[in-house]
Amino acid sequence: MAPVTDDDLAALAALRAEVEACTLCGLHATRTRAVPGEGDPSSDLMFVGEAPGYHEDQQGRPFVGQAGKLLEQLLASIGLTREQVFIANVLKSRPPNNRDPRPEEIAACQPYLWRQIGLIKPKVICTLGNHATKLLTGSPAGITRVHGRPQATEISGHSLYLYPIFHPAAALYTPAMLTTLHEDFRRLPEMLAHAAPQAGAAERPAEQPEPPTADSRAAPAHAAGDAPVVTHADEAEAPPVKPEQLGLF
Ligand code: URA
């Protein structure tokens, strides 16, 4: 577990208050409550979903509807409760009628997520579904292609593994997806036990043949608001790191 200082806790509380009062995009006008995220700020494991739905918007808490019930079952299957992990979303406000997040909404909300990651410092972030996966990997490769394959990266100066998995809401009514989601989930405990990505271990963009120099590493590659380190334009050109390559399995 990453040690969380009193300063980190104060910064998280301040961030929560900022999110609750946020008017950076048009969604503030239609939301009931903002949903900053919740859980154990010292957890090694973080989940990032897409955006609050109806129930989340009513309660101001992430994953409290049907998808949340499935997420809790999945966590129980590996001996965890939702209180032992940190759960957040790409968007902190509900899009009307649960429509897809718009690029300008994602851009407005991204710094909040990056700050949360920098304070929580998880070893592993499970990105749930396409929107979270594409934002955090910085790649257009979709969840069907990249699920279940950890990718080393660096966010807000912190090295971690992204672990894309299907979104529980999508898996609820698609039995084959549900089976895959359970399988991918089962690999999490081993990953958490071994995941300790070193600074600079993040996967390099395909077009960058040499390891970065000391100078190029000096500035955080993924500081708040910056583009992610993992930037393959197409999975076919630069497939995600396989677990075997990371020595995780
Ligand atoms: N789906 C999400 O992506 N996030 C939530 O908080 C709830 C459902």
Image (cartoon, rainbow, N blue to C red):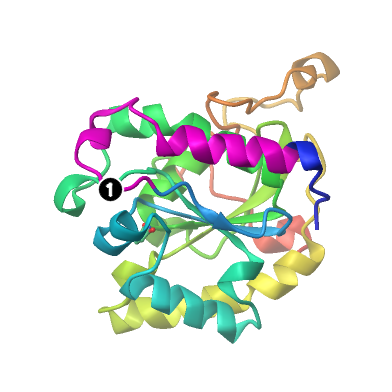
Relative side of 223 to 190, left or right: left
Seen in the picture, residue 66 relative to 162 is either above or below; the reply is: below
Other-residue count near label 1 (Cα within 10 Å), few / some / many at <14 / 14–19 / ≥20: many
In terms of depth relative to the viewer, which is nearer, 148 or 33? 33
Residue 159 lies in quadrant:
top right
Q: Is residue 101 magenta?
A: no
Residue 239 percent across, percent down from the top left: 54, 48
Q: Quadrant of ligand 1?
A: bottom left
Seen in the picture, residue 167 relative to 215 is either above or below; the reply is: below
Relative side of 7 to 89, left or right: right
Q: Which residue is mark 1?
A: 94
What amino acid is labelled 1 in the image? Arg
Quadrant showing the N terminus: bottom right
Instruction: Please give the name of the residue rendered at 31% of the width and 77% of the height, measured from the top-left corner.
Output: 172
Q: What span is in magenta? A: 8-34
Question: From where the camera sits, is residue 90 visible?
Answer: yes
Question: From where the camera sits, is residue 232 visible?
Answer: no
Residue 31 lies in quadrant:
top left
